[in-house]
Amino acid sequence: MTKRKVAYYYDPEIGNFYYGHGHPMKPHRVRMAHSLIVRYGLYRMLETFRPVKATEEMMQTFHTKDYVNFLKTITPENQERFERQIKTYSFANDCPVFDRMFEYCQLYSGGSIGGAVRLNHGMSDVVINWAGGLHHAKKSEASGFCYINDIVLAILEMLKYNHRVLYIDIDVHHGDGVEEAFLTTDRVLTVSFHKHGDGFFPGTGDLDEVGVGAGKYYSINVPLRDGIDDESYEGLFRPIMTKIMEVYQPGAIVLQSGADSLAGDRLGVFNLSNKGHAACHKFMASFGVPMLVLGGGGYKIKNVARCWTYETGVLLGCEEQMQDELPPNEFYEYFGPTYNLHIPSTADVENRNKKEHLEKLRNTVLQYLAFIQPVGAPMQERPPDLLPPEAVQGSRHYGRQRTASSDAEDSERAGATLSDDEEEEEEEEVASESEEPMEDAGDASDSSS
């Protein structure tokens, strides 16, 4: 079997962004994942790149100019001058204004756009950007911790070279922002496996929400109940995705890997192990279609880091060589009390997805898919790339050949100093065995990636 060419986007600065005290979303989790990727030696097998920052013009291929200008202009110091716009663009407790917010959007979006360009030009078979996957952001609205929808930007770039793009979302929350962006087209098929009902955010994504107009039946939703485990999840995922690949025949895939569907997440309600979560990546990679793999939700950050590290190994095809005992790393104390790579399902959690319910979901979705056909696009002049191929080649900052000293140097960079507030919160999380959602998260706990 030919070895996959896997590229990986990471900027050491990503872990320094901070939503604010008590907020569940912590970009620091990406830094923790990177540290484990370094310590496991995985990125000796990766082509690793620093993302080129997305520009305002790139963001405006989907988002409105006024919204992007607002993101660029507002700061914690001047936000009182923008009370009207804050309401207009749905900034609230879940989407706070924080320091260097626009730069944060530029970095995570730049990695996703760069990954799309690499796939378009055959430079990579798989591209990973764990900082991306912010699927709730709308055309002119922040939502669920998301400001710029890097997924939509990446898919729009992929459509320049592919007639059909498949989007898969395994976050515990419905991928509403991406679905809404492509609701009326058959050139993007979106499929989301998520919790639905009981007032769970964002409230959309029921089984009968299938798209509109030319996009009818090209939005697939699999609404699930609390406590779904690996076996039940795979029993839906594999037959549904097998049928989609058969009837839709996408030229490229985007997989949003929200880790809030793992057991024990602070905001999630599912009961997946990281092996069950990663089974989705392994299965989709088996089709050999170019694939962009992104992050997403995930609010028990030690589990997020372990999950995305393991999934990096799965995409490289070396997961069997990864020892369960975590290697020494800068954040070792955060992974207690087990200090293991793997995250088991929780034994005493009830799976409320009964056999009859799962069979109904599977059968209904398969009926919808009977209407799907592989569509083409009329021949027309291809728009220019958002990033020229030489830009995504030139942004490389880690090579395949690594040494012990360079690994240590990059690990040290990965462990840059946290803010005082963030350090205090991490210490509280390590000390807490109850794993309850943070009391001072406010309304943020009700809407999340």
Image (cartoon, rainbow, N blue to C red):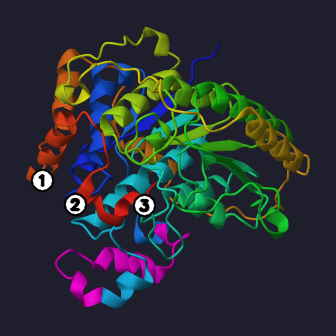
Residue sticking out furthest to the right: 370
Label 2: element kind: loop
Give, as a three-letter code, the residue at label 2.
Gly
Cα separation, mark 1 vs mark 2, equals: 8 Å
Tell me if I can see residue 53 in this picture.
no
Q: Nearer the viewer, residue 374 or 56?
A: 374
| Residue 107 horizontal side relative to residue 289, left or right | left
Disc 1 to disc 2: CB gap under 8 Å: yes
Q: Which residues are magenta?
A: 59-82
Residue 245, located in which quarter of the rendered image? top right
What residue is shown with label 3? 446
- The image position of residue 257, as x and y in percent, is 51, 41
> Residue, x 32% and y 39% (percent of image)?
301
Q: Nearer the viewer, residue 139 or 50?
A: 139
Q: For the residue carrying disc 3, how many other residues have a C-alpha within 10 Å: few (<14), some (14-19), or many (20+)?
A: some
Label 1: element kind: helix
Give, as a three-letter code, the residue at label 3.
Asp
* Rendered position, 25 above or below 272: below
Q: Nearer the viewer, mark 3 or mark 1?
A: 3
What residue is shown with label 1? 421
Q: Which of pointers 3 and 2 lies earlier in the amino acid sequence?
A: 2
Tell me if I can see residue 142 in this picture.
yes
Q: Which of pointers 3 and 1 lies earlier in the amino acid sequence?
A: 1
- The image position of residue 293, as x and y in percent, is 53, 40
